[in-house]
Image (cartoon, helix red, strand yellow):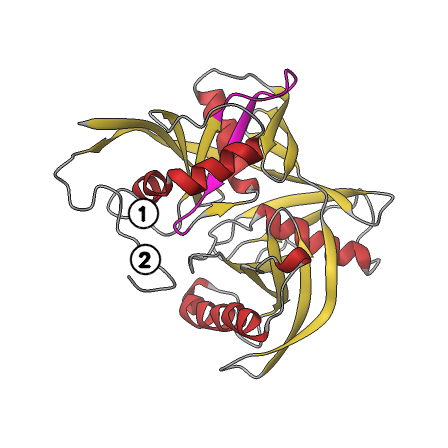
Amino acid sequence: MDCVHVVDSHTGGEPTRVVIQGGPQLGTGTISDKARRFAAKHDNFRSAIINEPRGADAWVGALLAEPSSSSATSQVIFFNNVGLLGMCVHGTIGVAATLAHLERVTGGRHILETPVGDVKVEIDGDRISVENVPSYLLGEAVEVETSKHGTVCGDIAWGGNWFFLTDGANVEITAANVDALTNFAWDIRCSLEKSGITATDGAVIDHVELFGPPTRSDADSKNFVLCPGKAYDRSPCGTGTSAKMACLAARNMLAPGQSWRQESIIGSVFEGSYSGNSNGSITPTITGSAYVTAESKLLFDQNDPFRTGIRFHQGGI
């Protein structure tokens, strides 16, 4: 019987599962090379780790690999219930907390190599800050004709993943409205693809971020983020907060170094700020905390008919 050693954590309520031992061998090279091999040859492993019966739609996985640079701590590939992710800030915070839990790193500054670029991580006790990849507004006030909710206007921005950002269309951003928010965001996601609205080089805009006023007095905004596999982010979404700050910066509504506190659908908060770049992009820094919840071995019986996971795609099997 095969087994895989994992450490689970949550960042602002959003879970991360880090593969510590038993993952596939991806050879040498850049993290982008390894991510392509992982996607092409080891999708059953991805599904087995993240999907039911061992996981659930909300989980994000992280596979560690030896870095190509001597200055980096590790390479990391992030994945979810339907495929690979470019970057994942909540997952990066979870990876950092996991490595600290395993005593592989101590406090201070560390570099992680991801398929979309290197990110810097600062560990200061329970507070973990991620200097994310450069983020930017690609399309402002883009209109999409949805199937069920009429014309929706929003921004297209990069924060390590591609986002369509808009307001909540009069649906209050609360946990009680998760179904309505999911239906609205999924309608936008499907309508973007149907309309042929894409990001750079035809990339799919696979994250939808809805906004409303905060519930907490110490927050600037509250969001609902729908991820590619139709699961919503329990955390404020670090790449989504990066994309949001890029939109605000482009409109001169948030100054470099100014704090932006983003509340999630469940009330957790990420604190963000940014520095500007000469090309008009920003370099965001997102701060949060992660807590290790389990250290375990996942078992894989050759006779198990769901050994490689139950695959749910777009809300159905």
In the image: residue 95, left or right of residue 118 = left
Q: Residue at x 32, y 57 (%)?
A: 312
Q: Disc 2 marks which residue?
A: 312
Which dot marks residue 210?
Answer: none
In contact (CB < 8 Å): disc 1 and disc 2: yes
182 in magenta: no
Q: 259 or 92: nearer the eye?
A: 92
Left or right of 252 on screen, residue 107: left
Residue at (58% x, 53% y) in the render: 263
Most foreground residue, 303 or 283? 303
Circle 2 crowding by C-alpha within 10 Å: few under 14, some 14–19, many from 20: some
The quadrant the C terminus occupies is bottom left
Specify the amino acid type for callout 2: Phe
196 in relation to 299, above or below: below
Q: Give 292 or 157, whichever is nearer the viewer.
A: 157
Q: Could one spot residue 213 in this view of the protein?
A: no
Q: Residue at x 59, y 59 (%)?
A: 222
- The span shown in magenta is 65-82
Where's residue 154, x and y in %?
A: 67, 69
Distance (Cα) linking label 1 and label 2: 8 Å
Predominant SS of the magenta segment: loop
Residue at x 82% of width, y 61% of height: 251
